[in-house]
Image: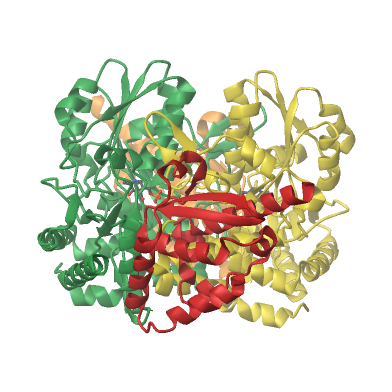
Chain colours: A yellow, B green, C red, D orange
Amino acid sequence: MNFNINKIRQDFPILRQKVYNKSLIYFDNGATSQKPQQVIDVLNDYYLKHNSNIHRGVHFLSEKTTQAYETARKTIKNFINADNDYEIIFTAGTTASINLVAYSFAEKFLFEDDEIIISEMEHHSNIVPWQIACERKKAKLKIIPFNNNGELILDEYKKLITQKTKLIAVNHISNSLGTINPIKEIIKIAHSNNIPVLIDGAQGIQHQKVDVKDLDCDFYCFSGHKVYGPTGIGVLYGKQKWLDALPPYQGGGDMIKSVSFEKTVYNDLPFKFEAGTTNYIGAIGLGQAIKYIDNIGIDEIIKHDKKLIDYAHKKLLEIPEITIYGQAEKKSSIISFLINGIHHFDTGMLLDKMDIAVRTGTHCTMPLMKHYGIEGTVRASFGIYNTCDEIDILYNAINKIIKMFKK
Amino acid sequence: MNFNINKIRQDFPILRQKVYNKSLIYFDNGATSQKPQQVIDVLNDYYLKHNSNIHRGVHFLSEKTTQAYETARKTIKNFINADNDYEIIFTAGTTASINLVAYSFAEKFLFEDDEIIISEMEHHSNIVPWQIACERKKAKLKIIPFNNNGELILDEYKKLITQKTKLIAVNHISNSLGTINPIKEIIKIAHSNNIPVLIDGAQGIQHQKVDVKDLDCDFYCFSGHKVYGPTGIGVLYGKQKWLDALPPYQGGGDMIKSVSFEKTVYNDLPFKFEAGTTNYIGAIGLGQAIKYIDNIGIDEIIKHDKKLIDYAHKKLLEIPEITIYGQAEKKSSIISFLINGIHHFDTGMLLDKMDIAVRTGTHCTMPLMKHYGIEGTVRASFGIYNTCDEIDILYNAINKIIKMFKK
Amino acid sequence: MTINEIQDQIIEEFSIFDDWMDKYSYVIDLANDMPIIDINKKNEKNLINGCQSKVWLDAKFKDNKVIFAADSDAIITKGIISLLIRVLSNHSPEEIINANLYFLDKIGLRENLSPNRSNGLNAMIKQMKMYAIAYNQKLKQL
Amino acid sequence: MTINEIQDQIIEEFSIFDDWMDKYSYVIDLANDMPIIDINKKNEKNLINGCQSKVWLDAKFKDNKVIFAADSDAIITKGIISLLIRVLSNHSPEEIINANLYFLDKIGLRENLSPNRSNGLNAMIKQMKMYAIAYNQKLKQL
Ligand SMILES: Cc1ncc(COP(=O)(O)O)c(C=O)c1O
Ligand SMILES: Cc1ncc(COP(=O)(O)O)c(C=O)c1O
């Protein structure tokens, strides 16, 4: 339960990798995180020794793998404080989770002229599924605006809610601005109007304490690969009453109780939403990743995040040529910026030459970029293994770039 | 290009695992295959050294991972002889691939009273998505029957085709019976009526030469985990003209060109169908698995398969108490049977005690079980690493079980 | 005998087997020796669907004791059922509710209880306890 | 000069740089020294969208030679564009179609051509060749 940065860094073998002959500074955690040895070992172990398809297997290996899979579900359930194991659905990732809800919810509850509310700072994965659903059902999408600091304007949000509002979907933390959104308040307001809320937690789960009971959210989605777990696995948490109410999304093996050409009976939760062979080894790896961060302690991680983002702000604001996009009061470890007069792509490219991995572009949030009237930003996003020393190197690198352009 | 069984067995570390203190005989390849060290190493290597989210990354790691991902796509394209890389869509698995087509095809081309044809021997993953689509669009599902040998009755198939038929979906190899279906002929008949065909290749890709150009199939689906690759990754091959025509399935990052709240423009193939962060490390692992079997040579694999299934038939038919379900003339390495008077579950359980992993039950093909009027079978399904010696051990084990029940 | 006394008795019976085959042969014998359950009781209402094997469980309440009868289409499942009935049947609801079924572990048949085995045994034990709870509730209401 | 002579010339120019910074500084200089493209040519039709940086490419055909003009909003992309124009512009369609652009590799800027970089350079080279093919077609029809 204490945060030992050296120990943590040692857990991540990729940090010892050399890029262009120097050690990598990995500031692209918003896109995906690196994996600790503990997670890599579990994946390895399962492929080497225990791999077998889960559920209904009569044999020893299948049993062992099924147990590990269901234990991973329990680990996640405990981590986010859900009521029941079966409220944890394994999916392919955040995008898959949101699409599942967008489809199934619309199928049952969305009708012509109904409304869904999202925000102006959503990732495309939390925009397009709702656009598709609204188009299919002839419903309307309404947008919560944000102010120039990158904070959602709650008064405007309240005004958007009508009798026709069927669901609200917002992100926990903005992947472009780092804003920690007041989701508990957003949920409270929605619930006082009997409207369910989906939280896109792709950037939330690894940076904030997520207690779905305390938040009272109806759905919470996240990806394994952004929370130090493997690729191709994610989670949809849903309250039982909603998961029971929604029709299944995909059809296939394991999601049914019985199939005949006349009548197919769907299985109970969580299997109703886990059609086909899931990424069971990915799920086991994700369970291990959650254990890993739970072991460090989310409170310690929040402290570390705060240290990094405060330091990054302070340093970058020392450079007069820098504009930071997103200066919300509550902000997590993502910092988006531009060097005045220099294209974000040029900056990213030159930082890469200096062994600093950042992301550049719209970060899949085009409407947000439109808000600021820009085409993209340079984004440094931090993980548990990043340090203030690395931010110093970024600071120096930015100054070098500015010099290259000045002369 | 020669089939060295000892070398192959050495490639699969799990075969050296002890279960109940004896070496494992793994006859559950229909459910999932084991992974060669070559595949496990690639996964490891990517997690240890190169992991980074793909596409749009400005930095070195992202570049390296993107290249590997796109190379995997090319490997698969070459393996199945597709025309273009972008006709290979990475999905989460066969079930996800079929659901994608079932949804998108129905959205655009399926209307009230239209018909879709599947067969009586389909896996639930190739039944339920079509049931859902038909229900949504008020269309009808029609069923190609099979004879007691487990062969589709093509005359009946021809009779089912009408002006209203919009699509035909059948499996390449039956996962319960082992039947190799005459898909080329089925496709030809369909095409002469201008009807597209989807092939569920979950059991086909690892056992047969799949040349999508020669087959002329419109869609071909398979899972990575059944073809010696990792979990959570699969492929949808689609002809460009169809993939272009279908609307996107899931919305999210990477599948769009531009997003605004007024108008969203979808991306080109293959990205239009790859919403969100795909299982890119899984895809790289799958590429390696395909390389692995391509290296052995599919013709060699077919020969090995034939040797095993012929031997298994011969041995099992020596036991009078055994009934084999599925005795098609063209049959791949899957054998389903029952010992008269002994419940399939008892058999599976006792085989497990003798370190033989088989699957028991309906194998997600309930309508097929109904055809035979049974509740399930014991299924032994072979992979490239299985041997006739192992079949001898199965033979002895079955005789032991019969003795246990007789006394 | 108390529930635990019966469990200990079974553990002792099984202690003579030193290989899995003898043990399972004995379980099969137990199944074959089980009294045949009334065909009327093998109805939809009593069916516990374990995906792979079916279990039928019937319960009645007599002299403050719960009496179970059960059957399965799979013989090993049925043999284990016969042990469960021997242990739990003919006891008070209270005793059944509080029973800790350690004997399956001790005789090395624990794996049969894994939910993955989908043989319905787990669901059956749950159902037996549910009956006991229900009868207990009834008792209190009297 | 032939396309290859120009390429060799560029390779020689770049050979004096021994670190990436000097090299990229030079690319930036090249971009800044590029003649400003007519604003009318930065239109939708000439735009090549590379996701991250935009490239505008204009072509005309004069005296059997293709003349390219181009621009980009990203400076490094623009610098590399200036090199591509220096190499390919003012040559016959045939020469452009057959050009093998080895110089980017040799001067260590190859990575800028990776499709992943999404800087539009790849699409631009393709577009330049497409223009050459189109003009060549026209020539043949005369
Ligand atoms: C014929 C067939 N189709 C579809 C599937 C579903 O594959 P997956 O579970 O990998 O999605 C299977 C695997 O069980 C199969 O055998
Ligand atoms: C806020 C947000 N939502 C959704 C996503 C999509 O996640 P994934 O690509 O893992 O499905 C991301 C990741 O880029 C994100 O940052």
Q: Is residue B174 above or below residue A350?
A: above
What quarter of the picture does the N terminus of chain A occupy? Answer: bottom right
**Position of residue A305 measured from the top left corner of the image (x, y, whole percent):** 78, 66
**Position of residue A82 measured from the top left corner of the image (x, y, whole percent):** 71, 54
The residue positioned 65% from the left and 27% from the top of the image is A109
Q: In the depicted view, which residue is nearer to us: D30 or B285?
A: B285
Q: In the depicted view, which residue is nearer to us: B248 or C14?
A: C14
Q: Is residue A101 above or below residue B334?
A: above
Residue B171 in view in this figure? yes
Residue B61 in view in this figure? no
Q: Residue B406, located in which quarter of the rendered image?
A: bottom left
Q: On the picture, is B187 further left or further right than A66?
A: left
Q: Residue C7, located in which quarter of the rendered image?
A: bottom right
Q: In the depicted view, which residue is nearer to us: D11 or D64?
A: D11
Q: Is residue C138 above or below residue B357?
A: above
The residue positioned 12% from the left and 60% from the top of the image is B303
**Position of residue B88 measured from the top left corner of the image (x, y, whole percent):** 36, 45
Q: On the picture, is D110 further left or further right than A197?
A: left
What quarter of the picture does the C terminus of chain A occupy? Answer: bottom right
* Count of marks, rendered view: 0
Q: Residue B37, located in which quarter of the rendered image?
A: bottom left
**Position of residue C39 measured from the top left corner of the image (x, y, whole percent):** 40, 44
